[in-house]
Image (cartoon, helix red, strand yellow):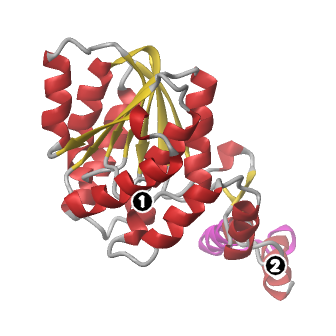
Amino acid sequence: MPVEKALNTLLSRRKFHSLSSRADSRACKLRCRFNHLIRNCSSANPAVVVAGDEKYGNKQVISITPRLYDYILANVREPQILRRLREETANMRGSQMQVSPDQAQLLAMLVQILGAERCIEVGVYTGYSSLAVALVLPDLGCLVACERDAKSLEVAKKYYELAGVSHKVILKHGLAADALKSMILNGEAGSYDFAFVDAEKKMCQEYYELLLQLVRVGGVIVIDNVLWHGKVVDPMVNDAKTISIRNFNKNLMEDKRVSISMVPIGDGMTICRKQ
């Protein structure tokens, strides 16, 4: 590689020609920049990236390319009723708010692993994620579904009925924070196994605090959009929603009431287990 050869030549001259300290410093800096560039360039495999911090040992991790994501989606066991809902929602305004099939599959598996019977969803939209959860709940299980948009909720209700899970879903039309506070006042604190939040980003902290009261010890809360299209690491982006998500992520990192795992699936989800 011509650049690397030139750098090696420049550095090796130190042995024979006593370069000035300024030249030595410049050469070393070039070498460091070159090595950092090589670590972070993956021209041979664009699906692989390396952590910028050398202390992680140049660990290679997957970066999802369109081709690789198509492969992931091809390996999702998506029930027919969910596929129908996804395709109908794709033609609606705001369809990007719908969780991806791989996310929904993970949520359903978490519910099954927990053996959950009582669940909450904050932000239903047209019901893709809530339907995925309801499908795996036992027949006597329940899902409290909070959504403020009546039009979206009508689509969700249609698919709950088509899937035969309407009896498992308790709809709360209105502001989610009000619904959660009412549930706490109603004596339901500590009685839920699982909760999923995919709603107003500036409200994440409040939703989380309310759900932490409603979920039992050992229960799980999942928060969506924690990577926020990559904006969380962009210093040039400082809108209210992005700042809220950054602050929420920072607070969650320091919250000893839960154990956490941030998962780079969809737009990023953090899984929290109440201690």
Where on the picture, by quarter, is residue 33? bottom right
Q: Camera-side residue: 4 or 180?
A: 180
* Residue 264 seen in render: no
The kind of residue on which mark 2 rests is Glu
* Left or right: 137 in relation to 202: right
SS of the residue under disc 2: helix
Main SS of the magenta part reads: helix
Q: Camera-side residue: 91 or 225?
A: 91
The structure residue drawn at horizontal position 71% and vertical position 72%, both measured from the top left corner, is: 41
Q: Camera-side residue: 216 or 186?
A: 186
Task: Give the residue pinned by disc 1.
Answer: 233
SS of the residue under disc 1: helix
Looking at the image, is mark 2 or mark 1 nearer the viewer? 1
Badge 1 crowding class, 10 Å Cα cut-off, few under 14, some 14 to 19, many 20 or more, is: few
Task: Give the residue pinned by disc 2.
Answer: 4
Q: Position of residue 196 (x, y in %)?
A: 41, 39
* Left or right: 123 in relation to 38: left
Q: Position of residue 114 (x, y in %)?
A: 57, 22
Instruction: State the CA–CA distance, disc 2 to disc 1.
Output: 30 Å
The magenta segment is 13-35
* Left or right: 81 in relation to 89: right
The kind of residue on which mark 1 rests is Val
Q: Position of residue 20 (x, y in %)?
A: 66, 73
Q: Position of residue 187 (x, y in %)?
A: 20, 11
* Residue 117 seen in render: yes
Give the vertical position of 149 relative to 15 (above or below).
above
Q: Is residue 79 magenta?
A: no
Badge 2 crowding class, 10 Å Cα cut-off, few under 14, some 14 to 19, many 20 or more, is: few
* Image quadrant occupied by the C terminus: top left
The structure residue drawn at horizontal position 53% and vertical position 30%, both measured from the top left corner, is: 137
